[in-house]
Amino acid sequence: MRLALLLISLLLATTARGDDDPDLPETRAPGPLRQPVQLDDQVEQRLEWLEKRIDAEAKSATRWESLWSVVDVGGAGYGVYTISQQHSRGALAAGVVSVTKASLGVMAISVLPLHATLGARELAQRDRHKEDRVARLDFAEKVLYRNVVDANQCFSWKPHMLGLAVHLIGAVIIGALGDWKRAGESFGIGIAVTEAQIWTKPWRARKDLREYRETFGNVVPPAPPAKRVKLGASSLSVTF
């Protein structure tokens, strides 16, 4: 219980996330460089292009979420097995740490999915036939831009340092209970899985934004969204 409270306190203190992170490359446009769209055929061309790419990005994001949910569920199951088979305090602590981090990882993916998944849902919920075409285009461009910000999280120091902190806390707890060897294994495997999660996040939005700019012109960046707490599936990885 104390371990869960420690991990949740660390996450809430360090991961209030806004998508206007200045550390992210190629996520800031210098201003509204796109000329206002006036011709209906231009609007339709842009919308058709964006909707196809946003849908493809959503499918990639869903695959990523499914894969790492399975990994985390497997890690939680292994942790439960470890607890049932071990009797030393260090081994039991390793099992509890594994179950806690894996469970938080599953919860993070379920409660806070990637923006690519959210953006496709939001676009699909808007009435394509009744909505003003230029307004729909503006929203679709902002979805693409937001997906790029999400994809560029791997270049920020925050998810890497958060993963390091979470796994270090877990390792110290295990070691303090008498099993530094198991603590080292837990830390090493946890870091490896965390980095794999971070660097395998869907990246195609960066390519789509580049192609969109080359084809149609620049994207008007959205106003900075409200900050939200991000538990971060890429930082709460399974340790087993």
Image (cartoon, helix red, strand yellow):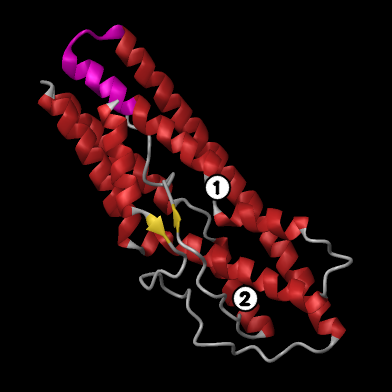
**Is 210 rendered above or below residue 71?**
below
Q: At 19% from the left edge and 25% from the top edge, which residue is drawn? A: 182
Q: Which mark is residue 211?
A: 2
Q: Earlier in the sequence, mark 1 or mark 2?
A: 1
Residue that lies at the very extreme toward the right in this rendered image: 129
Other-residue count near label 2 (Cα within 10 Å), few / some / many at <14 / 14–19 / ≥20: few
> Magenta stretch mostly in which secondary structure?
helix
**Structural distance between the alpha carbons of marks 1 and 2:** 25 Å
Badge 2 element: helix
Please name the residue shown 72% across and 60% down the image.
123
- The amino acid type found where label 1 is placed reads Pro
The quadrant of the image that shows the N terminus is top left
Q: Position of residue 12 (x, y in %)?
A: 35, 48
Labelled disc at residue 176: none
Position of 199 with respect to 127 (left or right) is left
Task: Give the residues in magenta.
Answer: 85-98
Q: Nearer the viewer, residue 120 or 231?
A: 231
